[in-house]
Image: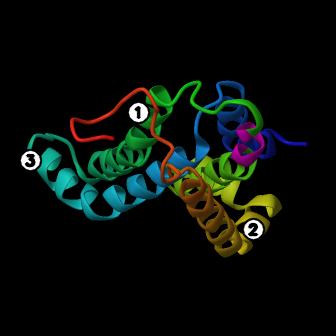
Amino acid sequence: MDSHTLALGALVFVPFLFLMLLRINATLVFLSLCLGSVLMQFVAPEAGQFLSIFSAHGADVSRLTTNNIKLGLLLLPVVLTAVFMIRTVRGGKLALNVIPAAGVGLLGALLAVPLLPPGLAHTIMSNPLWSQLTKMQVMIVGVTTLLCLLVLWLQRPQAGSQKHGKRGKHSD
């Protein structure tokens, strides 16, 4: 196994292990990754133009800066959500965290690899595993999104599940 296969594997499995071991709500992290993708798409071009005003270097630096900005916008919501959601998954709900955590690793790799330095990105993208991963991207996004929505809907508070000790002024 070559080092680029290991790099791709690490991009997928490290987030998965991180989310599972720290019992982080992977559903919210997956949705934060989707938000980061939206930020990357819509905010990065203007942010790159704004920063290019302050750059005294040529186009190569602005391209690198644009990819760095995109990567930052992609990962910032993910990192913040992960930090705030440490130890929020308890007991039997950890099993419901497996597929969203895998989705975070897989989608994160799909979104982040093209933003890596060109040489590294090219070698990872020329790997046969990358080709298989990109062929499965629709299934990865679709299945993970549906499961994340289902998990969110299942977490909805049930009617009448308020604490019995708290009563309003007009309770009988």
> Around disc 1, counting alpha carbons within 10 Å, would you say few (fewer than 14), some (14 to 19), or many (20 or more)?
few
Magenta stretch, main secondary structure, is helix
Q: Secondary structure at mark 1?
A: helix
User: Residue, x 59% and y 24% (percent of image)?
Assistant: 87
Residue that carries the numbered disc 2 in the rendered image: 131
Residue 28 placement (x, y as % from top left): 51, 46
Q: Nearer the viewer, mark 3 or mark 1?
A: 1
CA gap between label 3 and label 2 equals 38 Å
Where's residue 146, x and y in %?
Answer: 62, 68
Relative side of 14 to 73, left or right: right
Query: Which label is found at residue 80?
Result: 1
Amino acid type, label 2:
Ser
Nearest to viewer (mark 2 / mark 1): 1
Q: Earlier in the sequence, mark 2 or mark 1?
A: 1
Residue tagged 3: 53
Instruction: Using a 10 Å C-alpha cutoff, classify the residue at mark 3 as few (fewer than 14 neighbours), some (14 to 19) or many (20 or more).
Output: few
Q: Secondary structure at mark 2?
A: helix
Q: CA distance from mark 3 to mark 1?
A: 28 Å
Q: Decide: marks 2, 1 in contact (CB < 8 A)?
A: no
Q: Is residue 93 above or below residue 152?
A: above
**Which segment did they paint magenta?**
93-97
